[in-house]
Image (tube, coloured by chain):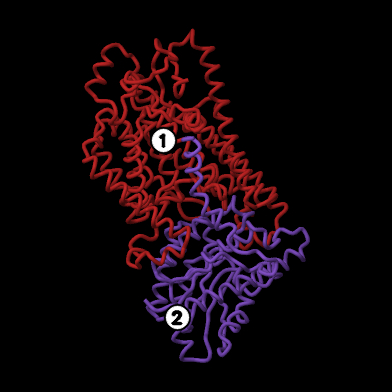
Chain colours: A red, B purple
Amino acid sequence: MVGGAGWPWHTHQNGQQQGKVCKGFAHCAQSSDFPYCPPGRLQGLLMAGAESKAERDLRLDFFRGLALLFIFLNHIPGNVVSWISNRNYGFSDATEIFVFISGYSVMLAFGALPERVGWMVTAARIGRRVWQIYTAHIFLFMVFVAHIAYVADRFNPAFAEEMGIAELFEHPHILMLQALLLKFKPANMDVLPMYIALLLAFPLLLPLLKRWPKTLMAASFLLWFGVQRWHWNLPAYPEGGWFFNPLAWQFLFLIGAWCAMHRNSAPWRRLPAGLTSWAAGLYLLFGLAIVSTWIYPPWGQYVPHWLRRLLYPIDKTELDLLRLLHFLAQAYLVVRLVSPHAAFLSSRLARPVLLCGKHSLDVFCASIFLSFAAQFVLVEVSPGLPAQFLVSLVGMGVMVALAYLLTWYTDTEKAGSAPRGGKTRVPVGGD
Amino acid sequence: MRRLLLILLLFLPALPALAQGNAPAMEPKERCALPDSLRFVDAPLQNLAKALKARGEIRIVVLGTSSSLKHDTGGLARTYVAGLPDALQARFPAKQFAIDNLSMRTQSTAQMQKRIAAEVIPAKPDLLIWQTGNVEAARQTDTNSFAENLTDGLRRLHAAGIDAILIAPQYRARLSPMVDTERFDQMMNWVGDSEGVPVFPRHDMMQFWAENEVFDLQAKNQETQIREAEAMNGCLAQQLAEMIRRAVALPGR
């Protein structure tokens, strides 16, 4: 896999202050993010000599890392540890966090590039990123095929026929071709193809977003709305459409990019803080109440029938309005409650999560691999609670260990190349 | 101390899961036992209730895929349908049950929905047992079109005054890397909830039994495998008949 590559990382341009730990208000001044840095003082400090254009917002790494851990846990069917995942507490889940932060990070990573290196080079760099993710996806597909081949060898074929799997595997060459075309996607391998599609479109969207942000966001909303209404989707194999419909999820991705673009002016600050927080909080509570009825069906009897008719089904493929609103409410409250300099983000406890978020592509790919391995253990060795805890903890441990390894590797590489090159990335979290 | 509290707080939500996981008293004789949450039903079967009051013979149609044929795909193990007449008879001793099985292998929900209009409604049964979702999961059909076909079929039945009970997809741990049945299971629950139709949670029941290693479906010896599959299908038949009994007893909306 791609050594040292964080998933779209936030490049730090800071030759002179390389490796400097930023804390307190000066840190805030350089972070140029979200509502915690008053713009006036920010500009003053920037003009006073802080040369840093931007710095990693640790919240991005932290919540992306958390989303990765949740996605890993959720990818193991019947895993009791996945109860800690946010999907059990509201309409949206880790995918929304992941896509939003990806949009945000892509904007941070590539948004300013066209002015410096031109559109062609920017597009080429994004293309290189797409290629890396595509190869990672195909590598995972090979792992999947190996897994299936083993299971098929040992398996009672009657079960496979019941599911209609047998006919799917009658023509493996077609299956391979469809996988290369991103049309056949095994269970749990839907996220990367969506990300590839979104990233592939980004070079075209970036100039539009910078020039006519309102128009593009309106078009993005209309496309999302069209999908809700007419169910447009990209074709998949053997039938149907993409599970994560890029035509719908592009809206959240672009909301992320738009937020990154407006992080200095922070238009969300103009919303009436008290009222919006209350509305968001109440909506999250409502989501919690409804989701609890899915987990414990007897509570469902307290949900009136008209409300059930109104709510269901809540579609993930097309990023249902209930899910989108749930994520936005969550994000708004997090932005209000968690400062980019919150002490816990720099704590030792948060560091493993932060590092997972920093090396997200590698950690994500590893998590897919680990979820296959975990499923294998639960099916072939033991399905019980101790095994569920064990595979979850070992899996998360391996993800964190990989993140540490990659951090060590990038730091070592950086130390080796620092005297020659001026550009570097700032270490994550006060170290 | 604060960190400890924070960690405890993080794992607090896992407690109900742990409690649920250990809920039923798993005595060896009680292999069919399930937690109450999996046996819950709040959607009534009013038309069936009326028919039970009015008539001695009850006509039931089963529409599904290979897991609803009398014998499973390999033709070896008896399915839940095989155990259903006895299970129903035990709960409604004074009644006769005529079960017409229209199930066919690898039938999609869209095809079944057409058969509801063409075959089920003209036959005017008192209850349709509609099992689906696995074929869609294997073919990775849109969950949306799955939901639309289900809803459409249920509304046609409702308009014709025929009750229905949905049977959730099967849970097969070994196939989970290939087939994500959870999406279709959840979608079916939502459709059932919104249409006021009971959903028999076969997926969650099978998952519960698998996690608690109640039935040894992965036994190396094929005979044991078949015997265990039949035992589990027998439990499914008992639980289904029990859910029907409870849904019939519920007051109408």
Q: Position of residue A229 (x, y in %)?
A: 32, 56
Q: Chain of mark 2?
A: B
Which residue has dot 2 on it? B121
Furthest residue in direction top, as rendered: A419
On the picture, is B112 further left or further right than A283? right
Of residues B227 and A175, the one drawn nearer to the viewer in this rendering = B227
Identify the residue under disc 1.
A102
On whether disc 2 and disc 1 are found on a single subunit, the reply is no
Q: Amino acid at mark 2?
A: Ile
Q: Does dot 2 land on a helix, a strand or a loop?
A: helix
> Could you give the CA–CA distance between mark 2 and mark 1, rounded to whole angstroms?
50 Å
Give the total number of marks visible in the rendering. 2
Where residue B159 appears, x then y in whole percent? 37, 78
- Left or right: A151, with A134 as reference point: right
Q: Chain of mark 1?
A: A
In the displayed structure, A253 sits above or below A49; it is: below
Q: Position of residue B132 (x, y in %)?
A: 52, 66
